[in-house]
Image (cartoon, rainbow, N blue to C red):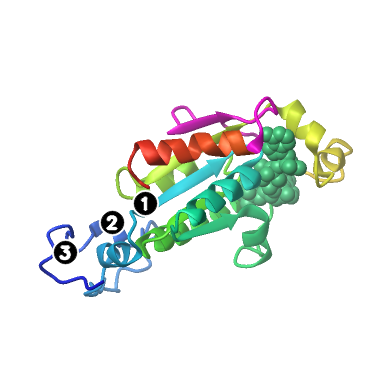
Amino acid sequence: MACSRNDPRIDYHMDENTRMSDKSGTTANTVWHAHKICRHHREFLNGQRACLLWFTGLSGSGKSTIAGLVEERLHEQRKLTYLLDGDNVRKGMNGDLGFTDADRIENIRRIGEMSKLFVDAGVITLSAFISPFRSERAAVRDLMREGDFIEVFVDAPLDTCEGRDPKGLYQRARSGEIKNFTGIDSPYERPDAPEIHVVNDGSLSPREVADQVVGYLRQRQFI
Ligand SMILES: Nc1ncnc2c1ncn2[C@@H]1O[C@H](COP(=O)(O)OS(=O)(=O)O)[C@@H](OP(=O)(O)O)[C@H]1O
Ligand SMILES: Nc1ncnc2c1ncn2[C@@H]1O[C@H](COP(=O)(O)OP(=O)(O)O)[C@@H](O)[C@H]1O
């Protein structure tokens, strides 16, 4: 399917929002290069509207499970997706970061920038990270174009998460073996106004919860 420069469905103006943020000012002597092929061309090619689904919640709340099921549903509908997941990213690009507040802030900053690149590639991006601080989630939202950032609060009570404890981390945090564990001795700031708030306390199956997220995407015509 060709994408000509006369296609009325495409906004060919350079997207200001594809510029990387520079809070430190260290890129003052670099100049943004506007390439001919932009996000809109890639979305056209992919036959979809890109967005960022940002899953936040306690460890064990079900972020990975729900995000994975949502991705499967999208894949079945021939949508191009990519799922960035806390444990996986920390094994690679963010392998140098731990769980102090400062490291979590840097973790989310890098993931926000990376998510933005995926969205710019025209991909429906799913990012599943505890992302415990409101200010960092707001910073990622600010990186994105209005309407592209969909915050999904995976809400499960701490005692439910602790009861699941699939990796035995809560037990180790309670015994003091792991420090700065979210919900134990490190804070989790609940979202004030997430686009999607799913309660994943076990009263619904993961599939039913994932359906709520897919329903939102359908209702808002992302898919
Ligand atoms: N101290 C501490 N606190 C919270 N979580 C811990 C900790 N140490 C290791 N883990 C494991 O790391 C996963 C969370 O990584 P994230 O990158 O999502 O965390 S954060 O957003 O930077 O807060 C998290 O994965 P999930 O359980 O999938 O959330 C844990 O497996
Ligand atoms: N709705 C649910 N009902 C029962 N168990 C669930 C539900 N959602 C997730 N789980 C289970 O809870 C555990 C933690 O889920 P996970 O997706 O790894 O959470 P997170 O990524 O937030 O740490 C897993 O063992 C998963 O199978």
Answer yes or no: disc 2 within 8 Å of ligand 1: no
Name the residue tied to disc 1.
143
Nearest to the eye among marks 1 and 3: give it. 3
Label 3: element kind: loop
For image coordinates 36% across by 55% down, the residue present is: 50
Label 2: element kind: helix
Mark seen at residue 70: none
Kindly indicate the quadrant of the structure image that contains residue 184: top right
Q: Is residue 201 magenta?
A: yes
Mark seen at residue 12: 3
Around disc 1, counting alpha carbons within 10 Å, would you say few (fewer than 14), some (14 to 19), or many (20 or more)?
many
Residue at the far right in the pictured view: 175
Q: Is residue 80 something that shows in the picture?
A: yes
Q: Is residue 81 magenta?
A: no
Label 1: element kind: helix
Q: Distance between the Cα atoms at labels 3 and 2?
A: 13 Å
Asked whether, in this view, residue 32 is left or right of residue 175, the answer is left
Note whether 189 is above or below 119 in the view shown: above
Task: Say what amino acid the circle numbered 2 marks.
Answer: Asn
Q: Residue 56, how many percent across, how many down?
A: 56, 40
Q: Residue 180, how many percent across, how many down?
A: 73, 42
Name the residue tied to disc 2.
17
Around disc 3, counting alpha carbons within 10 Å, would you say few (fewer than 14), some (14 to 19), or many (20 or more)?
some
Task: Say what amino acid the circle numbered 1 marks.
Answer: Leu
Kindly indicate the quadrant of the structure image that contains residue 160: top right
| Magenta extent | 181-206
Q: Distance between the Cα atoms at labels 1 and 3?
A: 20 Å
Q: Residue 38, how many percent across, how many down?
A: 26, 68
